[in-house]
């Protein structure tokens, strides 16, 4: 979001626009208000510039190269070391699972290391690229062929994609409270300045996908 604010007779006029390259949509708006809390909310939208999610949602220059490097390291280092029980020796299984899906086009097994969180005994994974992540699309194409490795053990699983906005919002609020360092890197959360009352998570929540693995 880009925001311009002016003040006239104690009334704030806020002009703003949003542009998301993936959806290729521009949203224009004007707000006339003397409610300072609304002004703070508009100025505190997540994700913030420089964060991983901001770069993804706004098509940062060079992002495709970063994704290629990420895939290279996954394919030739992270995935093999996880599959052959080397990384679990270093407690990687407490942070990442190795997700196995079947390619929606190739029919071949695909492996993706993904950060996970446990909430109310549910294992949650997050697609920061929303519906555009390959693992997410493969998972939805072959829901009965998904399993994951956590630590040294493989698990069969049933997937449940969280669709309700309020449920996703509750999870992300829980996330920023319990994992502020990860939230800062992922979408720019600042635990010293941000609060759940003055920070707008809505734009990000509509983009990301959250999946329960049971």
Image (tube, rainbow, N blue to C red):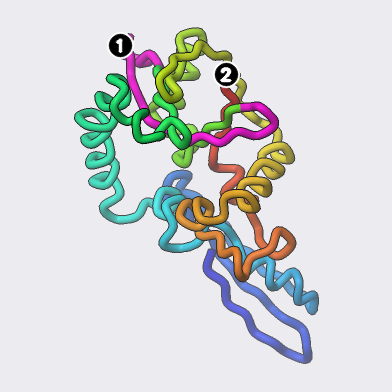
Instruction: Using residue 62 as the reference point, say whether residue 182 is left or right of it.
Output: right
The magenta stretch spans residue 67: no
The reply, left or right, for residue 196 in relation to residue 193 is right
Residue 156 spot, x, y in % from top left: 51, 11
Q: Residue at x 34, y 22 (%)?
A: 111
Helix, strand or loop for the magenta stretch, by majority:
strand
Residue 157 point in image, percent of width and height: 54, 14
Q: Quadrant of the C terminus?
A: top right
- Please indicate, yes or no, whether residue 135 appears anywhere in the rendered image: yes
Q: Tell me the SS state at disc 2.
A: strand
Q: Of 123 and 138, which appears nearest the observer?
A: 123
Does residue 112 belong to the magenta stretch?
yes
Q: What is the spatial separation of the Cα atoms under label 1 and label 2, in whole angstroms?
A: 19 Å
Residue 78 is situated, as x and y percent measured from the top left of the image, at 28, 32
Q: Choose between 164 and 123: the one closer to the eye.
A: 123
Write down the region rendered in magenta: 101-122
Q: Which residue is mark 1?
A: 108
User: The N terminus lies in which quarter of the figure?
Assistant: bottom right
> Is residue 138 visible from the viewing direction of this image?
no
| Mark 1 / mark 2, whichever is N-terminal | 1
Which percent across, then down, holds residue 138?
42, 20
- In the image, 34 versus 53, the foreground residue is 53
149 on left or right of 208: left
Residue drawn at point x = 26 percent, y = 52 percent: 62
Q: Splitting the image into 4 quarters, where does residue 198 fall?
A: bottom right
Q: Which residue is mark 2?
A: 159
Q: Are marks 1 and 2 in contact (CB under 8 Å)?
A: no
């Amino acid at each position: 979001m880009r925001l311009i604010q002016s003040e006239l007779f104690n009334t704030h006029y806020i002009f703003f626009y949003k542009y998301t390259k993936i959806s290729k949509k521009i949203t224009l708006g004007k707000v006339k208000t003397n409610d300072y809390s609304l002004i703070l909310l508009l100025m505190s939208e997540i994700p913030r510039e420089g964060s991983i999610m901001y770069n993804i949602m706004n098509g940062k220059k060079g992002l495709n190269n970063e994704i290629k490097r990420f895939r290279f390291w996954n394919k030739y280092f992270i995935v093999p070391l996880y599959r052959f029980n080397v990384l679990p020796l270093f407690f990687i299984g407490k942070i990442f699972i190795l997700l196995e899906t079947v390619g929606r086009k190739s029919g071949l097994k695909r492996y993706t290391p993904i950060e996970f969180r446990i909430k109310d005994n549910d294992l949650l994974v997050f697609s920061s690229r929303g519906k555009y992540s390959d693992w997410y699309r493969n998972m939805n194409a072959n829901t009965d062929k998904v399993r994951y490795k956590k630590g040294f053990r493989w698990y069969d699983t049933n997937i449940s994609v969280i669709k309700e906005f309020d449920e996703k919002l509750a999870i992300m609020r829980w996330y920023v409270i319990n994992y502020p360092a990860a939230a800062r890197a992922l979408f720019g959360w600042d635990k010293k300045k941000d609060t759940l009352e003055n920070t707008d998570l809505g734009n990000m929540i509509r983009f990301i996908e959250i999946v329960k693995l049971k």
